[in-house]
Image (tube, helix red, strand yellow):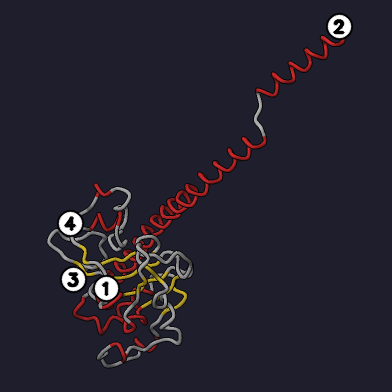
Amino acid sequence: MAIKNNIDRFRVGARNDNKKGFTLAEVLITLGIIGIVAAMTIPSLLTNIQDRQFKSMYKKYFSTLSQAMLRNYEDTGETFSYADWREMPFFICNVQKYMKVQSSGIDCSKVYNRAEAFWGTDSWPRTENSDKLWHSGAQWYDKKGKPMYLNGGYLPLTFVLLDGTMFNFNCYNSILLDVNGKNGPNVVGRDIYFLRFKRDSAAPVASIQVNEEYQTNACTQGGSNSTIKLTKDNYVEDCLKGTGWGARFYICSNPNKLNLY
């Protein structure tokens, strides 16, 4: 009888211990839920981390370009002027002297040896890969996934730094900057940004004038490539929820710090 009672007590204890654990089905369901939550949140988390890195790189290269242009201004007195767009190869070659450039769409040796002025984009002395330095058409996108293109006439005004960062001097006082080079995601407002110039300025600016309407990627308009016009009223909204062309500096992370002048 004593042996039977001991066995019964053992069984009851075993049953009590089992109540403290989980069944295999419960464990599998829990792991499945954790996996679903992770699949939903981790990509967004990684994207946010990557975007913060891109913004930090943007600030760095904005400063790099600004310093190069200011040094060029100190040495030559030369400022950026839309009126002299046909002479842009001279300006770009001068600025490149103060940056660590690995390749350029313009052959600067031929620029400096040229006696007469350039009459248009077709007369610019291009390098062999001048049309391949910036992204090919439909190989870069706005933040809504719309394919972007670049006016072929301005492709030679691209140069690449040693670390792969790409600059393209475009029309209407703007510069395109890809902080990640040919690596992805190649999306405007994430790793691709644009800078603008005031007329006859010695360095780029990262803000928009109160009464200004600014057409982004203006020399490649029409059809599927039409891009937004930025104003002080839609600048922040486009940065946060729109095409990404409104993204500059810290504005997406802190729209209250929008710098208007």
Q: Horizontal and vertical percent for residue 225?
A: 30, 74
Left or right of 35: which side holds 87? left
Which mark is first along the chain, 4 or 3? 3
- Residue 131 is marked as none
The residue type indicated by label 2 comes to Ala
Left or right of 46: which side holds 173? left
**What residue did someone put label 1 on?**
226
Q: Horizontal and vertical percent for residue 73?
A: 27, 70
The residue type indicated by label 3 comes to Arg
The C terminus is located in which quarter? Answer: bottom left
**What residue did someone put label 2 on?**
2
Check contact, mark 1 vs mark 4: CB within 8 A: no
Which mark is first along the chain, 1 or 2? 2
Q: Residue at x 39, y 87 (%)?
A: 126
Give the distance between the C-alpha atoms of the residues marked 1 and 4, in whole angstroms: 19 Å
Give the distance between the C-alpha atoms of the residues marked 2 and 3, in whole angstroms: 102 Å
Q: Horizontal and vertical percent for residue 169?
A: 31, 75
Check disc 2 and report its element: helix, strand or loop.
helix
Of badges 2 and 4, the one in the foreground is 2
Q: Residue at x 30, y 69 (%)?
A: 69
Check disc 3 and report its element: helix, strand or loop.
loop
**What residue did someone put label 3 on?**
199
